[in-house]
Amino acid sequence: MNAKPGLVRHGLTLFLAGLATGFIVPLTLNPRAGLSGHLEGVMNGTFLVALGCAWPELRLGASAGRLVYGLVIFGTWANWAGTLLSAVLGTSKATPIAGAGHAGTPIQENLVLGILAATGLAMVVAVGVTAWHLWRGANEAPAAPPLVNSKRA
């Protein structure tokens, strides 16, 4: 599975969404959470681009590749969306520091909490599977060629 083009496309689009979010921060009920949404978009977009560039080195099998791809696409976009939703709705249950002094309705609070909890689980599984495959593959990787010893006459 060559996920590189999709990861880079999603990454750049999410990066753009994060940049655009920066323009609406002052318009949200909770600007501190709005700033978090802006940063999540930019950072998660950068992560997807980096993962896409590293994809050929990961040597994930077909099943693991599909799993990781789906989880990181979901996790990065949901992280941005959940954090932005927290800013727009003014919730604080899932983000007590960024949401200090704000509260949404119980359904709003639980919706944001559910999105961010699913995000955390998805990203931990995706990065864990990726790291496991990467370290497992490190033992199978060909050895680097020896350095040439140049002697000067």
Image (cartoon, helix red, strand yellow):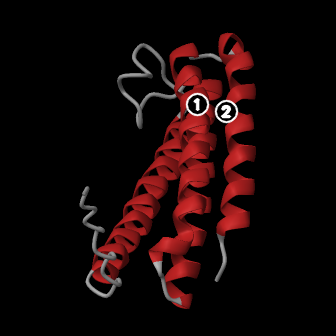
Q: Are marks 2 and 1 in contact (CB under 8 Å)?
A: yes
- Name the image quarter holding residue 69: bottom right
Q: Amino acid at mark 1?
A: Gly
The relative height of residue 122 versus residue 1 in the rendered view (above or below) is above
Looking at the image, residue 68 lies above or below residue 12: below
Instruction: Name which residue type carries label 2.
Output: Gly
Apparent side of residue 12 relative to residue 37 in the rendered image (left or right): right
Find residue 37 and name its label.
Answer: 1
Residue beneath the point at 75% across and 45% down: 13
Q: Which residue is mark 2?
A: 18
Residue 118 is situated, as x and y percent measured from the top left of the image, at: 47, 58
For the residue pair 115 and 121, the one nearer the viewer reads as: 121
Residue 50 point in image, percent of width and height: 55, 53
Question: How many labels, in total?
Answer: 2
Q: Identify which residue is drawn at 58% across, 60% down.
A: 53
Q: Residue farthest to the top?
A: 26
Q: Secondary structure at mark 1?
A: helix
Task: Identify the image quadrant of residue 24.
Answer: top right
Categorize mark 1 by other alpha carbons within 10 Å: few (<14), some (14-19), many (20+). many
Which quadrant holds the C terminus?
bottom left
Q: Nearer the viewer, mark 2 or mark 1?
A: 2
Which quadrant holds the N terminus? bottom right
**Residue 121 image label:** none
The percent coordinates of residue 4 (x first, y second) are: 66, 67
**Marks 2/1: CA–CA distance:** 7 Å
| Residue at the image position 58 percent from the left and 80 percent from the top | 66
Q: Is residue 101 above or below residue 149?
A: above
Expressed as whole percent of the image width and height from the top left, the position of residue 151 reads: 24, 61
Q: Residue furthest front?
A: 153
